[in-house]
Amino acid sequence: MDHPDYRLVDDVARDLGVSVGVVVGACGALGVDCSDGVHRSYTESIRQVVLQWAREGRL
């Protein structure tokens, strides 16, 4: 996974300040396969899901 357009789930989680499990869950909610990393085009969508979950008290 040495492609500049993909990021490790761990890195996305660290940037968002949440656990890897939360990022994996957000990917699942979006229908995104994150097993090989997260394409950068999905980062904002994942962030929006995480923010919504935080507003709902789900985190």
Image (cartoon, grey):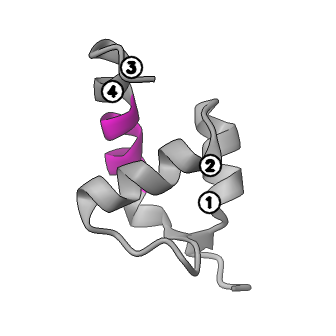
Looking at the image, residue 50 lies above or below residue 29: above
Magenta part of the chain: 43-50
Earlier sequence position, callout 1 versus callout 4? 1
Q: How many marks?
A: 4
What numbered label is drawn on residue 9?
Answer: 1
Give the alpha-carbon distance from disc 3 to disc 4, as whole Å.
Answer: 4 Å
Is the C-beta separation of discs 1 and 2 under 8 Å? yes
Looking at the image, residue 45 lies above or below residue 33: above
x, y (%) of residue 55? Answer: 31, 14
Task: Name the amino acid, label 2.
Answer: Val
Is the C-beta separation of discs 3 and 4 under 8 Å? yes
Is the C-beta separation of discs 3 and 2 under 8 Å? no
x, y (%) of residue 26? Answer: 38, 49
- Which residue lies under the disc numbered 4? 53
- Which residue lies under the disc numbered 3? 54
Give the alpha-carbon distance from disc 1 to disc 2, as whole Å.
Answer: 6 Å
Which type of secondary structure does the marked residue at label 4 adopt?
A: helix
Which type of secondary structure does the marked residue at label 3 adopt?
A: helix
Residue 5 lies in what quarter of the image? bottom right
Q: Is residue 43 left or right of residue 35?
A: left
| Residue name at image x 33 percent, y 27 percent | 53
Earlier sequence position, callout 1 versus callout 2? 1
Task: Name the amino acid, label 1.
Answer: Val
Earlier sequence position, callout 4 versus callout 2? 2
Q: Quadrant of the N terminus?
A: bottom right
Q: Is residue 6 left or right of residue 44?
A: right
Q: Quadrant of the C terminus?
A: top left
x, y (%) of residue 33? Answer: 40, 75
| Residue name at image x 60 percent, y 33 percent | 18
- Which residue lies under the disc numbered 2? 20
Task: Name the amino acid, label 3.
Answer: Ala
Which type of secondary structure does the marked residue at label 1 adopt?
A: helix
